Image (cartoon, rainbow, N blue to C red):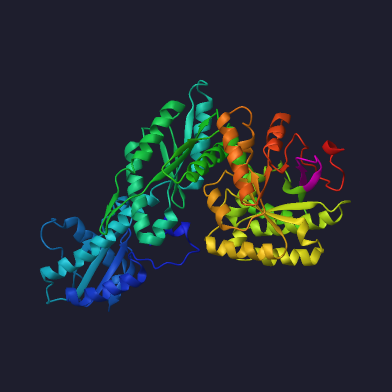
Amino acid sequence: MGSSPARDAQEKTKHEYSGASSERRSLLFRLLLPATGGSAVALLDISANGTPVVLQSAGSLPAALHKVDAGNIILDAERRWDGKTVFACPFFKDWSLIRIPIANQAHDNGPKQFLIALRLEGNNFSSAAESALQGVASQFSSEALEQAGRSSLPDREESLLILNQFIEKTGKLSRRAVFSLIHLNLDHLSLINERYGWDTADLILAEMIRRLKSVLPDGAFLSSIGGGHFMVLTPPGTTAVTTRSLVHAILQISSTPVSLEMGAVAFSISAGWSVYPQDAEDANQLILAARAALTEANRTGGGHERRANAELTNTYAISSNLEQDLLKAVEDGALFLKWMPIVDTESQKIVGHEALLRWIRPGHGEVAPNLFIRYAEEAGIIEALDSWSLRNACLAALRWPTPLRVCVNVSPVWLVNERLALLVDTVLTETGLPPGRLQIELSECRPFGPSDIAFRELSRVRALGVRLAIDDFGAGYSSLERLRIYPLDQIKLDRGFVQYLGEDMRADEVMYAILSLARSLNITCCAKGVETEHQMALLDANGCEEVQGYLLGAPIRDSHVPHPAMT
């Protein structure tokens, strides 16, 4: 059956392949024997010189079928066939044969495939035999055509060669004679594989290729780069404006579902594209830029397009091999903590420090925390980072000259797994930090999972004597519901509320309402992102117990040193 893009994309996932697999073919061929009344049936691949190869068979095949003469007999009869009468020919001594060609236009000048039935001479085949043979052949024909269309596309190696030729050719033209690289993918290929099977996914890919070819301009280059991904190079001289129009036309080819035997199957395409030489000046960087743009387009759920830009490309480059480097960072001690002071608004004294996880990635410098933490959650390695942060934060707090509170962020993933209480208890036991000095903070921006499970786990943590806080309060979608359900000690107000205080009346009113609500629930408030004295005064006047932000001090690496802002 050859390579399958759908199969390649999920080679580690086990599914039943529902197409014309070898098992299903074997069953079909066994059924064909009584249906045709033949002594044997076979699927043959015959080269131009007549050499036959038996791809599948049932029954007792004559030994002569494997000889070159057999292939030439079938090919000669094919050439002389009038296209009207039932195809039949004498086949060696005592045998007769009927055949149905497998439709495969891509093989016109190469090997041809035939589904044949053989029986002893003197016993003619009936029209029912031909119908039975035709019915099975039609299933193989659609499969053969689909594979032929796919295999006829250039691969990765040829794509890189052609891309370099485009760059060389364009370099000899005027500076305005640019071209674009468009990286396409069939959205949600894994889901299509799981729901319909690899064979259906391959048929969708084949139809996608056919539609792609119908909208591409003359001189464009199309290749398959595996796993449902394709590359298009626009003709030299194609501007960015024209490319964007072409990309929109490409996305529109999925507006009509693919008609299959099972019914209509909808699909969508995402595209990322880069322009030479504006977005990159060599082949590898042009590919990287388009891939980065496609990654961003896929984040929005599919069916979208994005053009590359320096920020997207840089972020994607940083993300490459991030999982391996992150795990290595945990093992090698490349992670470290910075500390943001938390100040009591009434006394103006530091009452705690928030531990902020940081990472200097070799060859890249310090990586933005929102980037690597988000990736760690997506890659399933956030627990390793959280464990490191919690343990090292507690050890650091023990060295502080005064017993201040230590605040540590953890992912809500721990709640779903019901393992947060065990982690906290283990770390407190190992380090000896008094539970009352530790505050666990969970971001409002991330899902907590089933509320009953989250409530039980948070209650276990609080029973240890540890404080609980909701971080980034107001930035999520269920803030008030979480206040009602969970046993919380503090809410940390998102900096988005704080930055407009004193400038936007509605922002002031929202802040006052939140502070009033927190007091009624006996929950303290800490405002993040405080940067002006005016913000500080408003928060103090309205009962916000704690604040943190650059007004009070930037994060520092050595927490045991008194913070400069508070000396």
Q: Is 249 in the magenta?
A: no
How many marks the image carries: the answer is 0
Q: Nearer the viewer, residue 97 or 287?
A: 287
Magenta-colored span: 338-352
Q: Is residue 270 above or below residue 438?
A: above
Q: Nearer the viewer, residue 538 or 370?
A: 538
Q: Quadrant of residue 529?
A: top right
Residue 229 in picture, x, y percent from top left: 45, 48
Q: Which residue appears farthest toward the right when viewing the image?
A: 401
Residue 275 in picture, x, y percent from top left: 51, 31
Q: Is residue 364 above or below residue 218?
A: below
Residue 531 in picture, x, y percent from top left: 71, 32
Q: Is residue 472 above or below residue 131?
A: above
Q: Which residue appears farthest toward the front when viewing the image?
A: 520
Q: Residue at x 43, y 33 (%)?
A: 234
Q: Residue at x 21, y 71 (%)?
A: 117
Residue 366 in picture, x, y percent from top left: 72, 42
